[in-house]
Amino acid sequence: NKVSVILSPDGANQIFQADLITLNRRSEYISNCDFHCSEVVRQIIAPARSSGNNKNMNMPPQQPMAPSRSSPLLKEIETTSLYTAIKGEDGSVKEIICRQRSATFLLPSQDPIGFKMYEATRGRP
């Protein structure tokens, strides 16, 4: 329910840590051929904390970091999917198609104190 990655975008002169934390999942049976799924994920992007030892991560030596934001970027992303099974003449499923919608919401706690409160809860809503 949590994925953490280290990113080094071209031209950024900075290494970032991105965390995706699943907050909620739901699925709903509609019919023999249709079902809905929904997932809400919190995304946290912040400058990576430098340990000074990048050998274990197979990364090139870190360039001097550009000035960074004082607080991480926090978003919640909701993705809703409708899956439909397309059956063949013999009644077996030949194909599954999906229609998907995603919405991104900025969280109001874009300040260091709000983030410390978030950290204290360890990502629990």
Image (cartoon, helix red, strand yellow):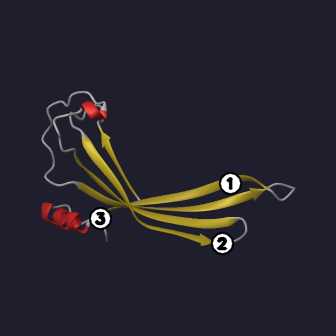
| Foreground of the two, 69 or 26 | 26
Quadrant location of the C terminus? bottom left
| Foreground of the two, 57 or 102 | 57
Return the disc, 3 or 1, that comes first in the chain's sequence.
1
**Residue 116 drawn at (x, y percent):** 16, 63
**Residue 85 drawn at (x, y percent):** 71, 59
| Foreground of the two, 82 or 28 | 28
Q: Name the residue tied to disc 1.
A: 96
Q: Name the residue tied to disc 2.
A: 30
Return the disc, 1 or 2, that comes first in the chain's sequence.
2
User: What crowding class fits label 1: few (fewer than 14 Cα within 10 Å), some (14-19), or many (20 or more)?
Assistant: few
- The kind of residue on which mark 3 rests is Gly
Do callouts 2 and 3 mark residues in contact (Cβ within 8 Å)?
no
Residue at image x 23%, y 33%? 54
CA gap between label 3 and label 1 equals 34 Å
Return the disc, 2 or 3, that comes first in the chain's sequence.
2
